[in-house]
Image (tube, coloured by chain):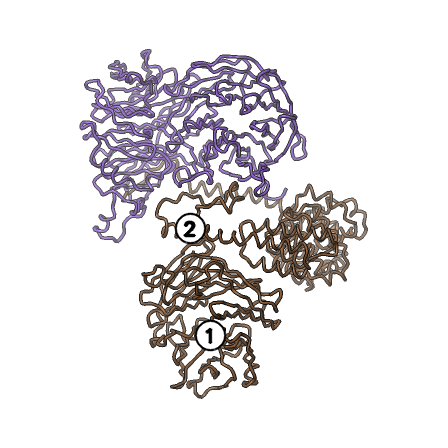
Amino acid sequence: MGEFKVHRVRFFNYVPSGIRCVAYNNQSNRLAVSRTDGTVEIYNLSANYFQEKFFPGHESRATEALCWAKGQRLFSAGLNGEIIEYDLQALNIKYAVDAFGGPIWSMAISPHGSQLLVGCEDGSLKLFQITLDKIQFERNFDRQKSRILSLSWHPSGTHVAAGSIDYISVFDVKSGSAVHKMLVDRQYMSVSKRKCIIWGVAFLSDGTVISVDSAGKVQFWDSATGTLVKNHLIANADVQSIAVSDVSMVPQEDSFVVGTAEGTVFHFQLVSVTSNSSEKQWVRTKPFQHHTHDVRAVAHSPTALISGGTDTHLVIRPLMEKVEVKNYDAALRKITFPHRRLISCSKKRQLLLFQFAHHLELWRLGSTVATGKNGDTLPLSKDADHLLHLKTKGPENIICSCISPCGSWIAYSTTSRFFLYRLNYEHDNISLQRVSKMPAFLRSALQILFSEDSTKLFVASNQGSLHVIRLLEGSFKHLHTFQPQSGTVESMCLLAVSPDGNWLAASGTSAGVHVYNIKHLKLHCTVPSYNFPVTALAIAPNTNNLVIAHSDQQVFEYSIPDKQYTEWSRTIQKQGFHYLWLQRDTPITHISFHPKRPMHILLHDAYMFCIIDKSLPLPNDKTLLYNPLPPTNESDVIRRRTAHAFKISKIYKPLLFMDLLDERTLVAVERPLDDIIAQLPPPIKKKKFGT
Amino acid sequence: MAALEEGFTLSGVPLGAGPHGLLGVEQSDKTDQFLVTDGGRTVILYKVSDQKPLGSWSVKQGQIITCPAVCNFQTGEYIVVHDNKVLRIWSNEDVNLDKVFKATLSAEINRIHSIQGTEPLVLFKKGAVRGLEALLAEPQQKIETVISDEEVIKWTKIFMVFRHPVLIFITEKHGNYFAYIQMFNSRTLSKYTLLLGQEEKSVIQSFSASVDQKFISLMSLSSDGCIYETLIPIHPSDPEKNQRVVRSLLLKTVVSGNARNGVALTVLDQDHLAVLGPPLPASKECLSIWNTKFQTLQTSKELPQGTSGQLWYYGENLFMLHGKFLTVVPYKCEVSSLAGALGKLKHSQDPGPQTVPHFVNWETSQGYGLQSSEHSKRILRRRKIEVSVQPPASKQLLSTIKKDSEKHIEVELCKFLAIKQTPDFHTVIGDIVLELLGRHKAEPSFYPRNSLMQLVQTHVLSYSLCPGLMEVALEKADVQMLQLCLQQFPDIPESVTCACLKIFLSINDDSLQEAEINMESVSDYSDSVQEEKMEEQTEILHNGFSPEENCDNCDRELNEKSRAAAEETTSCPVIPKRAALLNAILHSAYSEMFLLPHLKDIPAQHVTLFLQYLYFLYLKCSENATMTLPGLHPPTLNQIMDWICLLLDANFTVVVMIPEAKRLLLSLYKFVKSQICICSELNKIEVSFRELQKLSQEKNNRELYSIEVLELF
């Protein structure tokens, strides 16, 4: 297959933000996750847990609550006092409404999905009516003394439990007045703490209120009498989150999950006291320790417990007794890295552009003159250089960024502004010049791409339109805008341009891939849509074959000139991929091609990279898919017989980016988990010896 | 996972010329050597690992060997019977069987059994059994007839149970089967009628048996191809009476129903059986290993040249006649997992996708008997049969308890327990105990101690299933029962544990001596501690660092009295039986918060005694580096420490006032001090280790940037 020099890059100092909220939607089987920087991500649990959408964060918008309402509408509320609704089609914020109660700590949608209740810093609870395209303030509940940290509706919608500091209130929704006030014991391990914060409440249909608090307790209250029924002390630290199995699930309300600051997740189940008795009791059944830090948010899907927290992992732990077939759903998932590219590369100048939440970094790769054999680390004649640190203006996070293949253009976009820079290289000096007067329509981009010869810029904006811009020395000219097909507003998230500059492929989250002819500026064809979202796209040189990777790990090859799938693609679909290939749990995030070998496709996910050699036979389920050892002492005949099309390497992981710089050079950007952990706050220390 | 390894043939002359194949394969006194008795006239001694014969002996032309040769493990000699009545005894050096010791007996011999640890036993065709020594002393002695005229002995086996041989033999008469159990320690013979259940017509083709402490589990392979299990109690409740035992279906259709010949089974271990026979009517014969727990076929091996339908199993080797030669197939059973066991079934029977999850489920485990129905049809079939047998038996027993005598209840209970356990076994047992206690309440003289003990030992009871049991035992100060309950029940309330403790501490030595107490947790503490051993112990105590200054005072004080103290601590402060009882307390589960209030009620001198005992255990513990006590099931160091803390917490003000406890307290203070030191040192070391770990990680972590060479193959 060949020998490569690999630039192994570990200086991409990327740290994902901690997870603050998770909200599970049973109808669409989607999971919304909000992070501490305000980013909201949507995972499609049916599509192999693919992160199909995201809304960029905002410095002032710390999300404290996240809810799904009827019709799969997503709301969030945060410490800036605003309630936000997200537009899941156009991938932007539909509107923000100020609740006028100070920071919002909690939010809950009524069981019927038509009302929204928020708990504010000033102790007020505000009820909003959800109308067709907005929310409308309805009224206030009786104001409480301190902030409302948690909220839960009774499944009938008549009562609401609200957790505050040191007490839980039960409200009658009709009158808006508190019916009961249940004081929570501040004692913690027989030491009185100053305050007991009710981090979470859950209202069950039989009238039981479950509360979790900062003293490490899970308590069961009778809301009719306002009395404590049962107390479980489960942690030495705060219990920070609770989620009950959804009311719409069957059987309902027989299990719930709590997360603690020690990183433990406990599963509670309603179990019969003795065999064949109808009396049931909540029992703590399973503890899980998949986190090292605070578990800030938990969710309960019909088949899995979902948790996330400060350690930035999203963990999906399937409930084995609920999983019927051994497939993706039966495996534990730990999602750490975004399913999109944060790195772009200029092959010509050997530059890497790293995208962070609020800045960009430009690095020049080093070089070596030495050669070596497999596994050697070569001495560097020149180390990698940090050329540029470009900070964004304003509080918004960067959505996407790109460096042109020639290395002289950088473009990035936030939610409200688009930036284009011209880079000039004079010996070792580098100067940066912003291209001013961007046109009004270039406000926000979901994806940016330069053509191979760096003369054209393609921008996918929300609202579904695609702009084509010609770049001139220091200025630009708008060439064309491809408008979305009538009736669709789906935004394009992925772009690919052919090396000869004739074709542009664009894909949204669900509909098929559109291929545009750049020369004639018209839609050429649409690749038939597939059940699973596209995770990566690329167009091969010379042949103009479009290679599409989907979240179910299928890879298709589509000939653009012929407007049909290629023979190779048909063959592999007929034979099927190797079962180990299909069992990988991270999506392919980047596809590229070998400039001299048209039969080769290079693609990678977070744990492996693979070069597919289309000229070799395909592996079947009996062949060894991944063979790390070189063939030794074998005759060429055997080697040829056992060789198959998939050449896989798992040396570099977690792998965030990989590309071919030239025929014999690869660049691999790794982000070791240990480096991320080292940048997190220290976890709660548990003493191992003594007391 | 059970597996058959590649078999090999023992070379030599073709065997099994006679119509009945081999007479037998028996162990000799050296491992790896086996006596093979051919159906004709020859006995061959094989060394299996070398795959060659070591010796061969034949009887004269005209004589015929009628019983497999065995080895007398006590003398190393071999014994064989020819022409039914003539015994020959020889050793390795002898060449000609004609010239060796000979004894002619007055009755026909069925079989000689020899087993390690006892003299060979001779079973006569009419059911009488004699020891070899007694027979040789008087060969022509009269042998009585035990079984009736038309009964024929079909199969026999010998076991060692509690160092005494137990012989079981099965007889057949007009299609009815009877099992006889001959006990040699009590010289009792009990007879059981084997009830065949629904399959009245079937003929049993092969037997095998295994034994545990209470039952002989007799497996029988019937002509319908199924394997049945019969549990026969070793200690019969009423040896005089002819009792009945029911057999239950264990495995369904393991061999083809109408196999002509060549069907045999043998028990390999608790869960595995080897079956020889054709799995399908038309197929060749197979050796298959079945797992009875999961009802799965583990492995099988085809024997195309046919067998004689005989199978022997010794050590790790299965012996069978394959064609004309004796074949040895090594068998191995490694620790198996449920997934592994089920895997084989999945492949062999159900090629479609298996959708049933295999793990403990909190929600459905209660309804375990009925819900996981489609799990395996085999299991279901078996269960149905049991369920149909079950309810009358338990109901009958409950009604017996209401009126019958203690003795009779014991008998009935024994029978009931002999039946295979059902999924709701624990609730049934709970009901029986409640019924017994109910009757005790009504008539206080009725205290069926033995029955209750037997029920507790079924390992399925818990405190909450029979809350009255321990109260009654406490009332009666029945320490044996209390010890048993403490060992068996997982959920004893702390108040009851404490009440037990009070009784254990207060009961006088005389009444303790009478009680039968399980002593396995107490090892011999009597060996006195040497002076230098004490030195050693302090070193270990300090674990390599010097004790702190302020400890010196009490050290000195202690050293002054060290002689006296040494004497005091070297001997156990309580008698071994009491120690065993206290150990049961130490092993029991508790929650500090609930235990402490009850501990306060214990009188001061008892607290001191218990503390002395705990301190003694602690010293014993610290004598060796692993900090454990000798013995089978000793209290752990943690348990000892926790109880010392608990006792002191509860009774400190009292103990402090007692002059005789002062020295004890001082020494306890010293060791607590040293423990704190150890812990703080450990915490310090932990930090250093973590730093070391970090350093080594950094070493592994290469530079932030490097250029490497990669070759893809």
User: Relative to residue A543, is residue B649 drawn left or right?
Assistant: right
Crowding around mark 2 (Cα neighbors within 10 Å: few <14, some 14 to 19, many 20+) is some
User: Relative to residue A29, is residue A269 drawn left or right?
Assistant: right
Where in the figure is residue A235, as x and y percent of width and height?
59, 36
Q: Chain of mark 2?
A: B
Q: Amino acid at mark 2?
A: Leu
Observer able to see residue A86: yes
Q: Amino acid at mark 1?
A: Ser
Along the line of sight, the residue nearer the viewer: B565 or A111: A111
Q: Secondary structure at mark 2?
A: helix
Residue position for label 2: B342
Where in the figure is residue B502, as x and y percent of width and height?
74, 51
Look at 55% across and 74% down and name the residue there: B118
Q: Which mark is residue B488?
A: none
Along the line of sight, the residue nearer the viewer: B593 or B469: B469
Separation of marks 2 and 1 at Cα, in angstroms: 38 Å
Residue position for label 1: B28
Whether A266 is drawn above or below A451: the answer is below
Which colour represents chain A? purple
**For residue A403, which quarter of the picture?**
top left
Labels 2 & 1 near each other (Cβ < 8 A): no
Which chain does brown denote in the image? B
